[in-house]
Image (spheres, grey):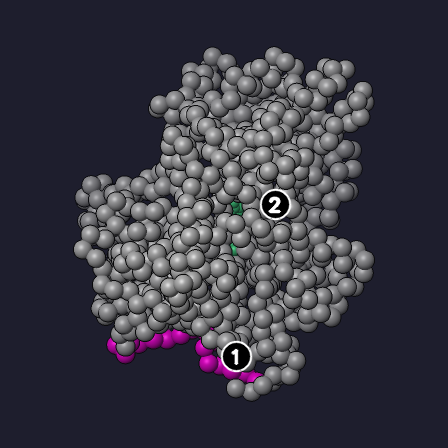
Amino acid sequence: MTAFVDDCVAVLYASQTGNAESISYSVYEEAVRRGFGASWHVLDDYDKFGFDSLRTVVFVVSTTGDGDPPDNSARFWRCLRKATRADPAAYKHLRYAVLGLGDTNYSNFCNTAQRLDKQLLAAGATAFYPKGLADDGTGLEEVVEPWIAGLWPALERVARCGSADSSGAGALAESLAGLAVGGGTDAAADVTPPPPTADSAGAAYEFQPLLLDFRPLAALKSITGAPRVPPIVCAGSFLDAEAESRYWSAAVQSAAAACPPWHAELEASAPHDASLAPFLATVASARQMTSAGALKRTLLVDIALPAAAAGHVRGRWHAGDAFNVFAPNDGRLVAGLLAQLGVDARTAQRPMLLRRAEPATEMPAHLRRFGSTPASIQDMLTWSADLCAAPRKQLLRVLADCCAEPADRNRLLYLCSKQGAATFDELRRQRPSLLEVLRAFPSCKPKAARLLELLPPLAPRSYSICNAPAASDATWQIAFNVVEYELEVVDPFSSAEEASAAVTRVRRRGLCTPWLEELARRSAPPQILVALRPNLNAFRLPPPLPAGAPDRRPVIMVGPGTGVAPFIGFLQQRASELARDPARAAAPLTWLFFGCGSAALDYLFRDELRAKVDAGVLGRLSACFSRDPDACAASGAARYVQDAMLRHQDEIADLMLNRDALLYVCGDAKGMGKDVNEAMATILCGYLASRPDRARELAAQLPPAKGPADAAPLTRDQALQLLTLWASRRRYLRDLWA
Ligand SMILES: Cc1cc2nc3c(=O)[nH]c(=O)nc-3n(C[C@H](O)[C@H](O)[C@H](O)COP(=O)(O)O)c2cc1C
């Protein structure tokens, strides 16, 4: 390998659920393999690795929320803004490439990558390779793999090396006939699993077999495009007897809490903003908000903040904020997985430390704490690895090398090849846990530590707070649907005639909500680990004006289902402002669009909302019932919130265009968030069609239209642009989730 001149490349990532982290890590590894002086960092560590002095950078960034950057880049964005404000050419020394991960089902596709690219270009930096935008909706691989393949020649050019290393780039062709059967040669940890114990079959886990069609494999002579096997990065070693006994005596103290055993370390971590530090809180009470027969089961849970924590977040949280819950994988799944891997109970619970497998390898960020904080394989699998993440090709490729049976190995190789793309999609559609994947290939016995390094980190789950501190500042109340659903899977071996009989219904459960429900049912619920989330999109009411001053901005809130949660907090905040300043009785219009299935079964917070209307805190309430034609007929209600908005289009347009109203939308991103956005575009176009002067004035604020000018005074594209402009000016605020 030729040494490079000026060959340093930093691979930087921002990732919410681990995809960008793991893809960036593969880029980093390949860069090292190709002889670059590479480093790998999370964006928020920018001050530790010296971002300002970097010359060649590859960014891999995902988008979350409503076009928001991942949490682990929040500080970086502030720093970037500050640096470019101080010096508009602050990054003229920087050459970069951006790979964005997103999903076209959301309205702001790959917004983080787009924004980053724009801001770096504006700050004088040069893109040395075209931006890649990968779509999780259709499969990240489609863009990620060719983008990475094309990155290397571009990087070699920019690093002025003149050495082209063709090995490993492009498609990997493997002859099935020539594939050697690997028997788990990737021994990563010192844990050597003994054979499975007789009763360790994980029977309690509700296991659902996969239904996949491997018949096309028989006709193939070779497969192409399978990813390379990533190197082993972690090695583990058990603590000696003395250290282990110290570990156990410390562990006893935290046994009463349902939280990672290393919670004290997390609590002691000093984030940029102290109010964001995790702490232990209690599941104080829970009640079901929906009646039997409702489509979903919605719970209202009170999380009691202990006095010390209420102090550290008191005055620092507001209605509209959200917090993270650190939830574990289902214990039955972990037990089943350990049994499948052949790890006995004693081995699974022995504390160990992880270290780099080789000095040059880097452990994934979420495992690095186990370099100094011992934990058992069982705890690491329970709290640190996402065991239900959609399987990735890289993982399947590694699993292929851990099979004793050639048939299992070949099927796994097929799944991660180009030829097996349709079967791979079907595998992901069935949303299997790792245990279900492993059981489909019975001779596959990977090492537990190898799995840990390949699985994405288990991300905390986030919930909007539905109370305002003014109502109770020592409690966070949350309303959530218990996530349990069924998927339809068609048996690939059934004939067309028996197709209907061949449909299997596969049950799946969420990670956090069934767990919270189970905790809430206990007579003495344990404490859980929570942390306030930064409110990156400023989803809050504006601060009250001084007493006596008229509060002139009307507020329109759109929150069907549990999306109503933050608005309950908003209304409590408004109620307390009004109580303090009764002169505001003639308050600005506050208008809520709420939607549910049925007036009788799942009208969340009905009494509270009616009380707020009676008290004059909520000026208008438009409730919609998607599955209740009787209620719609009786009250004239619409079925969906966007329909209700369209019925009031002139009033909404008037509020937004003439009275400087704020529009808040909370709830499901893919369906409702998109539909409301489209409805708003229709509302604006409709209103402005008969007001050409106003339309021209608004159009003048927008970037020049790309296509031919439309006959209408404000085109639909311009209306959508106007909404984006309002979002950037925080007049149109959205808190959307998947
Ligand atoms: C709650 C949520 C919100 C999302 N919002 C967006 C979005 O606004 N725009 C987009 O392009 N992708 C969005 N995505 C898709 C993610 O960017 C995509 O799944 C990506 O692969 C995640 O990468 P990560 O695991 O590194 O965070 C969203 C995903 C989730 C789960």
Q: Amino acid at mark 2?
A: Leu
Residue 190, placed above or below residue 589: below
Residue 42 visible here: yes
Q: Residue at x 67, y 21 (%)?
A: 576
Spot occupied by residue 330 in the image (x, y as percentages of width and height): 36, 46
Cα gap from disc 1 to disc 2, whole angstroms? 40 Å
In this view, the residue in front, 238 or 476, is 238
Residue contact at pointers 1 and 2, CB within 8 angstroms: no
Q: Is residue 420 magenta?
A: no
At which x and y percent is residue 381? 39, 55
Magenta part of the chain: 163-179
Q: Is residue 245 left or right of residue 676?
A: left
Q: Secondary structure at mark 1?
A: loop
**How many labels were placed on the picture?**
2
| x, y percent for residue 533 | 59, 43
Q: Is residue 434 above or below residue 412?
A: above
Q: Counting residues from the N terminus, which is met first, the one under dot 1 or under dot 2?
A: 1
Q: Residue at the location (40% across, 54% down)?
A: 248
Q: Residue at x 43, y 56 (%)?
A: 247
Q: Which residue is mark 1?
A: 34
Q: Main secondary structure of the magenta part?
A: loop
Point out the residue furthest to the bottom here: 2
Q: Is residue 385 above or below residue 735?
A: below
- Quadrant assignment, res 73: bottom right
For label 1, count other residues whose C-alpha is less than 10 Å away and answer few (under 14), some (14-19) or many (20+). Answer: many
Q: Which mark is residue 276?
A: 2
User: Which residue type does callout 1 highlight?
Assistant: Arg
